Image: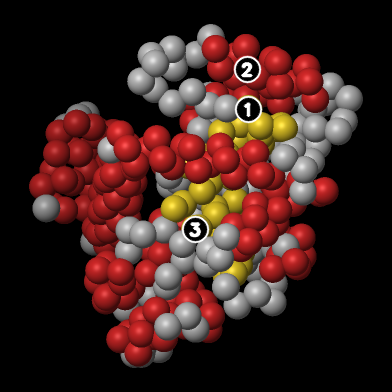
Amino acid sequence: MARAVDVPSLVTAARAGSPRAVARLISLVEDAHPALREVMAALAPHTGHAHVIGITGSPGVGKSTSTNALVGALRGRGRRIGILAVDPSSPFSGGALLGDRIRMQDHALDPEVYIRSMASRGHLGGLSWSTPQALRVLDAAGCDVIVVETVGVGQSEVQVAGLADTTLVLLAPGMGDGIQAAKAGILEIGDVFVVNKADRDGAATTVRDLRHMISLGNRKDPGLWQPPVVKTVAARGEGIDELMEAIDAHLAWLTEGGGLRRRRVARAADEIEAIALARLRSRMGDLRHDESVDRLAAEVVDGTTDPYAAADQLVAALT
């Protein structure tokens, strides 16, 4: 039985900046706690202020090091930061592996930086189903910027673009990332491309190839955002000022053209759909217990009905 939760007190504490309250609220999200509906209702009036930056890219390109450097630059501006590092699930506990926390030790003791590792729980998109609601918690808790760093699982990582206001795609020379980006459709979702480890051989070639592929894409309309390509050496902090300028420029472009609201409305629509589908799946599970689905399946096998008619009956039963 789920433990009772004093939601108003918890939300008040989180709004006041209590890391423990924020951690508790995100745990309620991850556990799909019965109090989650009340939590989201209480948080709703306080959301919509944070700039959400998604960071994606193949393993080994330096996502965590880049996040660390980016957070340092943002803190230099006095921003309050939330970091959601979506890790592969541990095969033992189902929880998140905490490698990202180790690489972000520069900010681990900063009270204005909240770092949370979340398990991807097998989701191929690299993002846990609970990530959108965890974003709401950090937004309501007063974070000015929320950085979502994904696990780096390849072609399915385009999912991060649905959660972010600004999506950074990281690549590195010598890893075949340019070709991989073209294959994965990542060129379509990147708002800023970052060639990290730019002190390595082949960096100039990677930048040139990337700019060429972007120029061949579908963003030739002058009114569309033209993604810049920024070179960085995140481990030494090189190029981070240029990266911040590119992020600022993208946010200004979004705000001026109404794109920021359009992205956030689309994000909320996806979240609503995911919650509705989860509820329907739960109700379908209940129907299976009373053998309704098995009976319909048997009728399809026997030829007394067809799958579409059976599905219509199931939907009618759910609604």
Three-letter amino acid code of the residue under disc 3:
Val
| Residue located at (18% from left, 46% from top) | 314
Three-letter amino acid code of the residue under disc 2:
Arg
Q: Position of residue 252 (x, y in %)?
A: 41, 40
- Upstream in sequence: badge 2 or badge 1: 2
Distance of mark 2 from mark 3, alpha carbons?
28 Å
| Residue located at (39% from left, 16% from top) | 222
Which type of secondary structure does the marked residue at label 1 adopt? Answer: strand
Quickly name the residue at label 1: 229
| Residue located at (64% from left, 48% from top) | 151
Distance of mark 2 from mark 1, alpha carbons?
7 Å
Q: Where 17 sits versus 84, above or below?
A: below
Q: Residues within 10 Å of mark 2 (few under 14, many from 20)?
A: some
Q: Position of residue 46 (x, y in %)?
A: 30, 69
Q: Position of residue 74 (x, y in %)?
A: 59, 57
Evaluate if marks 2 and 1 touch, with contact meaning CB atoms under 8 Å apart: yes
Quickly name the residue at label 3: 145
Which type of secondary structure does the marked residue at label 2 adopt? Answer: helix
